[in-house]
Image (spheres, grey):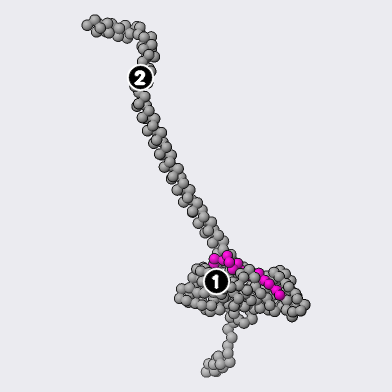
Amino acid sequence: MACVIISILLMTLDHRFQYMKEVRAAVSVIVYPIQSIVNFPVAAGEWMDENFSTRESLMAEVTTLKTQQLLYDVRLQKLAAVESENRRLRQLLDSSFKVGERVLIAELLAVDMEPFTSEIIINKGSGHELYEGQPLLDANGIMGQITKIGPLTSTAMLISDPNHAIPVAVNRNGLRTIAIGTGNPEELDIPHFPNNADIQIGDLLVSSGLGGRFPQGYPVATISTIDIDPGQPFARVGAKPAAELQRSREVLLVWPRTPAIQTETETETTEAEDQD
């Protein structure tokens, strides 16, 4: 009872006159270490939970960012490939406008990797009205001609193939000769220029149109080497193809314009119909 009375008396005095303020401050200083020790396990547990959760969230965020970066890198590479493809297609389309004949763009499906053989397979076939001997071009010049036609794909021989020959003429002065493949996509052989022929390194060779296979005036190659041996009747001449035989991914199929030529039988038939 005495303790109760003393407690009530102290609470009343403290409430009215704030006599116990300094005592409480002193007691709080003394009790603080005990409170800290008692609260340490709880505070430590909360700190560890917060740190581990923060680390896990950071690791998850880093993983997500790495995945996004990988996806963006792949898309960027694809975007670069699409941009390059669009640039090549624009060059081909620009070339088709310069050509002026009926044209069709085809893509390469496969390349023959055998030594001394230069053949490619394209994704166009008989359903696209292709024919054997049809010229192939890229944005820079003649690449070759169709040799085999299937329903969906076709095989083309490039001008660098040793079995391929194309009639050409020097664009500067009109001298005619034949360019033969060597198996090297960077070189053609020009075997029939006399030693005194008016040719120079850098001269452009274009298709002469002889033989009717390739239309006249298409770039074929540029003379790169001239070796004259007085003991031989012809100079050894090498030329670099104008087309990018090893780098082109798309080709341009051309239907050359052929003038309508009537035979004698057709003329006689037409005259007889006119008389009737």
Label number found at residue 35: 2
Q: Which residue is pictured at 59% across the width and 68% down the height?
A: 245
Q: Which residue is pictured at 39% across the width and 14% down the height?
A: 29
Label number found at residue 114: 1
Q: Quadrant of residue 218?
A: bottom right
Range shown magenta: 236-252
Q: Nearer the viewer, residue 90 or 239?
A: 239
Q: Quadrant of residue 137?
A: bottom right
Q: Secondary structure at mark 1?
A: loop
Crowd tier of the residue under label 1, counting other residues whose Cα lies within 10 Å: few below 14, some 14–19, many 20 or above: few
Q: Is residue 18 left or right of residue 121?
A: left
| Residue 217 x, y percent position in the rendering | 65, 75
Q: Does the magenta run of residues contain 186?
A: no
* Residue 129 in view in this figure: no
Q: Is residue 176 left or right of residue 35?
A: right
Q: Is residue 209 left or right of residue 195?
A: left
Q: Which residue is pictured at 41% across the width and 42% down the height?
A: 60
Q: Which residue is pictured at 61% across the width and 69% down the height?
A: 185
Vertical side of 143 occupied by 266: above or below: below
At label 2, the amino acid type is Gln
Vertical side of 133 occupied by 87: above or below: above
Q: Nearer the viewer, residue 4 or 59?
A: 59
At label 1, the amino acid type is Glu
Spatial CA span between label 2 and label 1: 86 Å
Q: Quadrant of residue 102?
A: bottom right
